[in-house]
Image (spheres, rainbow, N blue to C red):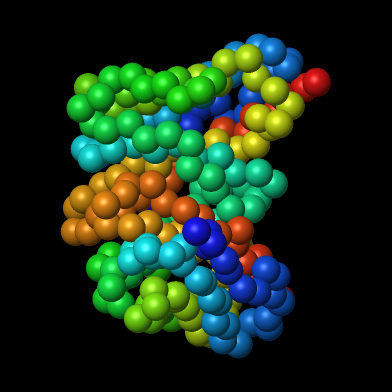
Amino acid sequence: SQQGEEDPQALSIQEGENATMNCSYKTSINNLQWYRQNSGRGLVHLILIRSNEREKHSGRLRVTLDTSKKSSSLLITASRAADTASYFCATAVTSGTYKYIFGTGTRLKVLA
Amino acid sequence: ETGVTQSPTHLIKTRGQQVTLRCSSQSGHNTVSWYQQALGQGPQFIFQYYREEENGRGNFPPRFSGLQFPNYSSELNVNALELDDSALYLCASRSSDSYGYTFGSGTRLTVV
């Protein structure tokens, strides 16, 4: 089952615009991570935010976490065509074993 | 640092057959997880190995099994293949002191 649900499922923007995607999850988490996947290949780790953090930045990426609402957002500023990919949130759950549960993903298309 | 490599990259099998997928973890990574990703979906957690012991399993039947070797490479075995097993299979590794996973590029399995 999917722990996280990303919203929107698909997003199309012009190069230079900002892209915002959201992730909602169901259970308590240790941390939340965002990954990027190009063309159905391997996932690339983008950023991690711990449950006691509210905001984190990495280059053009900004992640927020609201544990009371069980939600996170990923903002990509000044988007580029190379940002075209699917983006997934992954939540670390510790029930039974420490594992990551991925959401359904947001497909981002940046038009040049 | 060599990253995570998976083999083969593509594979076609017949329903009822057995398949073994291989993963070479990144140097220094003692934890490996396997994921199944159906087309258009997020990765689904299959199981995780830590120092050659399975320490977590997702909602997959026993015909999905695995091994982790002393050099931390691993295998995913699937018996009695079904058409629904057609998917991208991803291997991901991490070290004990890191939360972020390094993913391989995956094996695309097609069951006909």
Image location of residue B36, percent across then percent down? 51, 61
Left or right: A66, with B112 as reference point = left
Foreground pick, B29 / B40: B29
Does A1 sit above or below residue B108? Answer: above
Q: Residue at x 63, y 14 (%)?
A: A78
Image location of residue A69, percent across then percent down? 27, 22
Say if residue A88 shows up in the picture: no
- Residue furthest front in the image: B1
Left or right: A8, with B52 as reference point = right
Image location of residue A80, percent across then percent down? 70, 23
Does A32 sit above or below residue B34? Answer: above
Q: Residue at x 50, y 84 (%)?
A: B79
Foreground pick, A107 / A41: A41
- Residue furthest bottom in the image: B17
Foreground pick, B54 / A46: A46
Q: Residue at x 28, y 38 (%)?
A: A31
The quarter of the picture where the C terminus of chain B appears is bottom right
Does B100 sit above or below residue A8? Answer: below
Which quadrant holds residue B85? bottom right
Left or right: B76, with B88 as reference point = left
Say if residue B104 shows up in the picture: yes
Does A30 sit above or below residue B3? Answer: above
